[in-house]
Image (cartoon, rainbow, N blue to C red):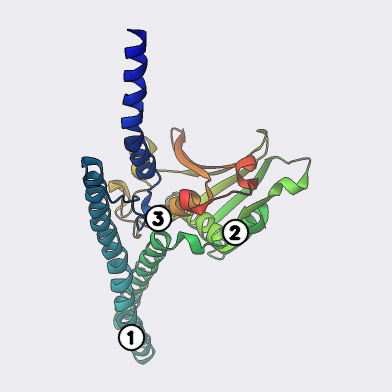
């Protein structure tokens, strides 16, 4: 009986090995490598038929993803030229009718709408690039505090925006402020976060805190007041095109925070949003210094 049981266990394992290999290969396939296929054998058994079926399914999924990526990119490029032409004509009309207050006010309003459409179009192009070309992101050594300072200075160009920066705890080793990242993308992310905080705050005020109190972690808090903070659907803020019903009167595309989430995912930074107190919300970015310093940093996993 022992010999029969051992033999049964051995042959069962041998017969399931090909299935385990297929499962392992399927688990390796992620959105950024849909062009990969399962290894084929020349046998005509059921497992070979299953592999062929999987590969055909992957081909259809890959084709659908490529169509989606190219659609957003192509439409955005096609829209860009007419928008630029309309904007140029509006600027010309403004110079001709500057002595007519009503006409000038109307043209200014149209110009603001065109500018908003152009910004939304640019953000769509950014999203398309993130989805289709993550491997092209170049990581260098950057100072996180300098990136935040530059972002604050950019947002503060609008005199209505008020931003306060505070170090909760400074690191004893200044080199801890240096991380692996893409400077341009990180600036884009923090500018979006700070601008978003100012835009949706009644006083256009945001507070930024840089905290090194946790071992091997950098915490960046961006805090702002929010009207009816209890009713904001925080779990949906990073979804593309999501706009809170109570903020419909504030202009925006609903893409800024989605772009931020993609940038943070590429860098493997944690980002979340929570209610800070009754009338405040906080965007928290957490950077794992050990993971960030890992030489085997793989963008395909982002």
249 relative position to 191: left or right = left
Q: Earlier in the sequence, mark 3 or mark 2?
A: 3
In the rendered image, the vertical position of residue 208 relative to residue 132, given as above or below: above
Q: CA distance from mark 3 to mark 1?
A: 36 Å
Percent position (x, y) of residue 166? 66, 45
48 relative position to 14: left or right = left
Which mark identifies residue 32? 3
Question: In this view of the protein, which residue sits in the foreground, 240 or 221?
Answer: 240
Q: Report which residue position mark 2 lands on.
A: 139
Question: In this view of the protein, which residue sits in the foreground, 209 or 185?
Answer: 185
Q: Earlier in the sequence, mark 2 or mark 1?
A: 1
Question: In this view of the protein, which residue sits in the foreground, 216 or 94?
Answer: 216
Q: Would residue 204 be seen by someone viewing this image from the given angle?
A: no
Q: Report which residue position mark 1 lands on.
A: 85
Percent position (x, y) of residue 279? 44, 37
**Tag 3 near tag 1, CB within 8 Å:** no
**Circle 2 Cα neighbour tier, 10 Å, few/some/many (<14 / 14–19 / ≥20):** some
């Amino acid at each position: 009986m022992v010999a029969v049981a051992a033999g049964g266990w051995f042959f069962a394992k041998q017969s399931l090995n090909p299935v385990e290999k297929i499962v392992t290969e399927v688990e390796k396939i992620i959105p950024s490598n849909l062009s990969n296929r399962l290894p084929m054998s020349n046998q005509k058994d059921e497992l070979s038929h299953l592999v062929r079926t999987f590969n055909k399914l992957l081909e259809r999924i890959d084709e659908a993803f490529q169509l989606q990526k190219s659609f957003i990119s192509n439409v955005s490029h096609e829209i860009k030229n007419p928008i630029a032409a309309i904007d140029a004509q509006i600027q010309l009309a403004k110079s001709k009718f500057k002595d007519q207050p009503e006409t000038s006010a109307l043209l200014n309003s149209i110009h603001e709408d065109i500018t908003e459409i152009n910004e939304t179009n640019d953000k769509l192009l950014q999203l398309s690039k993130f989805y289709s070309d993550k491997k092209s992101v170049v990581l260098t050594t950057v100072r996180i505090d300098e990136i935040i300072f530059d972002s604050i200075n950019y947002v503060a160009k609008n005199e209505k925006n008020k931003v306060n920066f505070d170090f909760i705890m400074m690191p004893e080793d200044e080199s801890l402020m240096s991380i692996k990242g893409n400077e341009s993308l990180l600036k884009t992310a923090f500018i979006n976060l700070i601008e978003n905080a100012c835009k949706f705050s009644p006083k256009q005020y945001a507070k930024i805190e840089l905290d090194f109190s946790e071992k091997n972690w950098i915490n960046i808090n961006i805090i702002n007041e929010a009207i009816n903070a209890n009713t904001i659907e925080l779990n949906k803020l990073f979804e593309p095109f999501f706009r809170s019903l109570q903020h419909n009167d504030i202009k925006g595309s609903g893409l800024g925070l989605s772009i931020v989430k993609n940038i943070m995912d590429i860098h493997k930074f944690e980002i979340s949003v929570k209610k800070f107190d009754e009338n405040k919300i906080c965007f928290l970015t957490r950077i794992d210094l050990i993971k960030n310093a890992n030489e085997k940093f793989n963008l395909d996993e982002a």
